[in-house]
Image (tube, grey):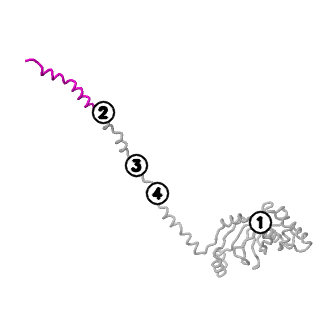
Amino acid sequence: MSSDTFHIRIRAIEGDTIELLCTTNTAGGYNDYACSRSFALMVIEDATPYGKPSPLRTRLVELAGGGTPPLWEQKFHKEHVAEFIASTELVERIGVIGDERAWADGRFSSSDAVAERDYPLHQFVLRAKVTDPKWLAGLKVGTSFGTTAFDAWWDDPTRPSNAALAAVERKASRWRPPGAKKAAKKAPAKKAAKKAPAKKAAKKAPAKKTAKKAPAKKTAKKAPAKKTAKKAPAKKTAKKAAKKAPAKKAAKKKPA
């Protein structure tokens, strides 16, 4: 139905926890998502089979005084949602649409097969914990259905924090136009050029290090030649020779 806000598929049920894969319909914003306890209760009530008594629907009717429970009213959730839903968690967002105009042009001008392949709807995964597993009675994994559910009590104090939602947003996958996908596949060629090994080889060349550590200078400093020159015994020998000079004088005074 075009009036459905989301299409829901029950992805998992474990004890008191249910995980829902929610596809955003085009009835609202293309990237709309909901994560409050009021939304979870509305979805679970929609998933409960009609025509069969269930603990959840029986209790909701009791709270409404025997009539249709007004799940679209914020006041009803403020008074009663805590009886059924303990907490909710936005787990993942898939295919966030950045260029909504390009997406819409392609989505609504293509065949169904092409639209689903190249212009898929935005999705998100919501995990809800109920106060008692009995509220999930009658639900089955794999069940799919449309819903008009929304965040009836948007500012529920137990709603996931802005920080938690922002963290999911940062990790979300993004829709890209078909042409952008093809361009992205060819990108590795540029990375390979940047990582050429030539530069690394030049930086690690050992030639410069060898030149710096050349032992020639050290050998010059420790050369013993200069010290030997300073301590040469030549001068001392000359003094000794001078002391022996009288021998010549004796030679001059020898009688005829």
Q: In this view, does 211 lie above or below 152?
A: above
Q: List the single residue furthest toward the right.
A: 65
First reached walking from the N terminus: tag 3 or tag 2:
3
| Residue at image coords 36%, 44% | 217
Q: Do the residues labelled 1 and 3 touch (CB within 8 Å)?
A: no
Badge 3 local density, few (<14 within 10 Å), some, or many (20+)?
Answer: few
Badge 2 local density, few (<14 within 10 Å), some, or many (20+)?
Answer: few
Which residue is disc 1 drawn over?
159
Residue numbers of the magenta segment: 230-256
- Please name the amino acid that badge 4 sits on: Lys
Which residue is disc 4 drawn over?
200
Q: Distance between the residues labelled 1 and 4?
A: 52 Å
Badge 4 local density, few (<14 within 10 Å), some, or many (20+)?
Answer: few
Q: In this view, does 115 lie to the left or right of 16?
A: left
Give the percent coordinates (x, y) of residue 31. 69, 73
Label 1: element kind: loop
Q: Is residue 147 above or below residue 243?
A: below
First reached walking from the N terminus: tag 4 or tag 2:
4
- Please name the amino acid that badge 2 sits on: Lys
Give the percent coordinates (x, y) of residue 10. 76, 67
First reached walking from the N terminus: tag 1 or tag 4:
1
Which residue is disc 3 drawn over?
212
First reached walking from the N terminus: tag 1 or tag 2:
1
Quadrant housing residue 154: bottom right
Which residue is disc 2 drawn over?
231
